[in-house]
């Protein structure tokens, strides 16, 4: 890792599983932090969610690059002592247990702060550590439902739909990394550690600030924005058309060969178009269905209209703009193969591409324990007692 990276020398203990906490830790690793992923002997549960490739799934391989893995059974006192030792020398501890679990394991903030006053301790949870839902389980899908996100993601069937990507977990990881960056800056100025809490439920709500404002200010029934913005089927695919200014509507209907729609009193401005959106969308839909995606994009772009094809992943990877700008890096993951990863914004391409692959379960256990003073015989005893898991060499 680059010795001049912003977080070079920063020690992070990642106790998280799944996506949100591990993604936060991976972002720190991208900026040079030394991240130890402490996981159960059976591995982070994301290693089993989806098609498995040995120790990994696509999820675990993507969100755990740049880390070293130590696999311990934290039910054993000896394992908890090791975890506390690692936390005592860490700058950052990230945990994603249910509220109260970390404290029961001796890994709560108060216990660790007593040994490490400058510690930055990040707790990632579903609903937070207070309130009537604190003990409830939460996933990305549950957070999408709870926050109201699904209520504003209605399909053509009129039903609320979950976004197919793990968007809330990923956003939670981003909010968490941002909060840690601020806390690190404060520690540099004031020398103080602190505890930080982020939850999937609150991060999901934070994404929806303007939608909540619309709902409140417009009596619970906000008008449709920017009609006829939306996705339209073409002869051979789909395109997205978007409007943000009134004059764009006139250019749009001219480009579509229907200039008379600009003078129709039902469609004279955004408010009128919102009131008659279903009629207008039906008219435009029948027009757009009559030609190909490429043909429409050529006309719409010539008219300076916001429009693009609705890509699948193969389309995106092959797109000339993505190819020319290096929009994806290729990750070589032992035991999995080679797969593309979108570039991380703000990270130089060379750094992103040079990230170490995600570790096997317990891959670095012996080396990590040796670094904190364990002799080979002590490591062997931990293995024999099934407290420490170290995989066989490949």
Image: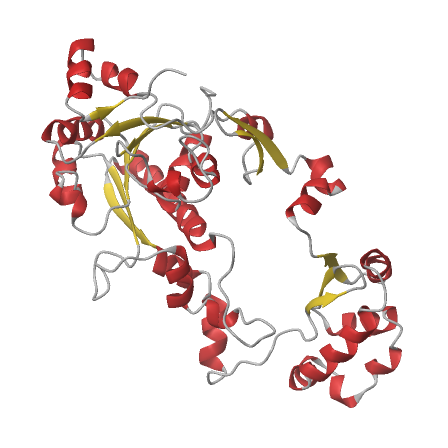
Q: Is residue 124 left or right of residue 269?
A: left
- Is residue 373 in view from this perspective? no
To which quarter of the image does residue 9 belong?
top left
Give the farthest residue toward the top.
376
* 83, 119: nearer the viewer: 83
Q: Is residue 229 left or right of residue 373?
A: right
Q: Percent from the top left, x then y, of residue 158? A: 55, 77
Q: Is residue 214 left or right of residue 388?
A: right
Q: In which quarter of the image is the C terminus?
A: top left
- Is residue 147 in view from this perspective? yes
Report the residue at 81% width, 87% height from top: 264
* 191, 314: nearer the viewer: 314
Report the residue at 16% width, 10% height from top: 377
In this rendering, the answer to whether 230 lies above or below 268 is above
Q: How many marks?
A: 0
Q: Percent from the top left, x then y, of residue 132? A: 20, 66
The structure's colour scheme is secondary structure
Q: Percent from the top left, x then y, of residue 180? A: 35, 42
Q: Is residue 289 left or right of residue 242?
A: right
In this rendering, the answer to whether 255 lies above or below 4 is below
In this rendering, the answer to whether 259 lies above or below 207 is below
Give the farthest residue toward the bottom.
265
Q: Percent from the top left, x then y, of residue 274? A: 65, 82
């Amino acid at each position: 890792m680059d010795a001049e990276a912003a977080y070079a020398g920063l020690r992070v203990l990642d106790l998280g599983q799944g996506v949100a906490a591990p993604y936060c830790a991976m972002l720190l690793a991208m900026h040079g932090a030394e991240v130890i992923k402490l996981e159960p002997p059976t591995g982070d549960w994301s290693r089993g969610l989806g098609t498995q490739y040995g120790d990994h799934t696509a999820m675990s391989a993507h969100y755990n690059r740049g880390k070293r893995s130590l696999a311990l059974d934290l039910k054993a006192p000896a394992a908890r002592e090791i975890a506390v030792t690692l936390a005592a020398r860490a700058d950052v501890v990230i945990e994603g247990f249910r509220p109260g679990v970390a404290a029961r394991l001796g890994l709560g903030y108060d216990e660790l702060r007593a040994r490490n006053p400058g510690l930055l301790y990040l707790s990632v949870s579903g609903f937070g550590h207070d309130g009537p839902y604190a003990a409830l389980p939460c996933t990305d899908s549950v957070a999408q439902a709870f926050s109201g996100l699904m209520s504003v993601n209605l399909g053509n069937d009129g039903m609320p739909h979950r976004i197919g990507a793990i968007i809330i977990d990923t956003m939670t990881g981003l909010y968490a990394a941002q909060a840690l960056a601020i806390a690190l800056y404060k520690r540099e100025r004031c020398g103080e550690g602190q505890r930080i809490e982020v939850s999937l439920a609150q991060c999901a709500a934070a994404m929806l600030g303007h939608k909540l404002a619309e709902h409140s200010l417009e009596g619970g029934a906000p008008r449709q924005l920017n009609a006829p913005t939306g996705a339209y089927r073409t002869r051979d695919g789909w395109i997205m058309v978007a409007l943000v200014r009134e004059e764009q509507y006139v250019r749009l209907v001219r480009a579509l060969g229907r200039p008379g729609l600009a003078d129709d009193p039902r469609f004279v401005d955004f408010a009128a178009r919102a009131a008659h959106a279903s009629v207008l969308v039906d008219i435009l839909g029948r027009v757009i269905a009559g030609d190909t995606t490429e043909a429409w994009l050529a006309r719409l772009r010539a008219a300076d209209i916001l429009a693009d094809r609705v890509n699948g992943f193969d389309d995106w990877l092959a797109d000339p703009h993505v190819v020319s700008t290096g929009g994806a890096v290729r990750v070589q993951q032992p035991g999995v193969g080679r797969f593309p990863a979108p570039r991380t914004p703000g990270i130089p391409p060379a750094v992103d591409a040079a990230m170490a692959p995600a570790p096997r379960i317990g891959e670095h256990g012996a080396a990590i324990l040796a670094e904190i003073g364990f002799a080979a015989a002590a490591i062997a005893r931990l293995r024999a007692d099934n407290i420490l898991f170290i995989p066989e060499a490949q």
